[in-house]
Amino acid sequence: EFETTTAAATAVMDWCFNFYNTTRRHSSAAMMSPIAYETAALTPRAA
């Protein structure tokens, strides 16, 4: 599927850092993606 091992490694790193760790929902974060969790945490709420 990949022409070189570098192309394969690049695809794996892209998946890890651009999808898995930023988009994938995590159970420890109330099933929100890390980006959604961070946005919710930084959004001011009424006291």
Image: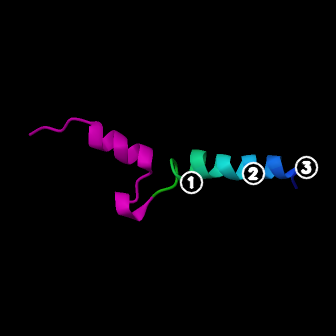
Q: Position of residue 36 (x, y in %)?
A: 40, 45
Q: Residues within 10 Å of mark 3 (few under 14, many from 20)?
A: few
Residue denoted by label 2: 9
- Above or below for 10 versus 1: above
- Above or below for 42 versus 12: above
For residue 30, say whether it is visible.
no
- Badges 1 and 2: C-beta atoms under 8 Å apart? no
Determine the CA span between mark 1 and mark 3. Answer: 23 Å
Residue placed farthest to the right in the image?
Answer: 3
Residue at 26 percent across and 36 percent down: it is 43
Magenta-colored span: 26-47
Residue placed farthest to the left in the image?
Answer: 47
Q: Residues within 10 Å of mark 1 (few under 14, many from 20)?
A: some
Q: Position of residue 40 (x, y in %)?
A: 31, 43
Q: Secondary structure at mark 2?
A: helix
Question: From the image, which quarter does the C terminus lie in?
Answer: top left
Determine the CA span between mark 2 and mark 3. Answer: 11 Å
Residue placed farthest to the front in the image?
Answer: 6
Residue situated in front as seen by the camera: 3 or 6: 6
Q: Amino acid at mark 2?
A: Ala
Q: Position of residue 34 (x, y in %)?
A: 43, 49
Q: Amino acid at mark 3?
A: Glu
**Numbered disc in front, either 1 or 2:** 2
Q: Secondary structure at mark 1?
A: helix
Q: Secondary structure at mark 3?
A: loop
Q: Amino acid at mark 1?
A: Tyr
Residue denoted by label 3: 3
Question: What label sits on residue 20 in the rendered view?
Answer: 1
Question: What label sits on residue 35 in the rendered view?
Answer: none
| Corner quadrant of residue 38 | top left
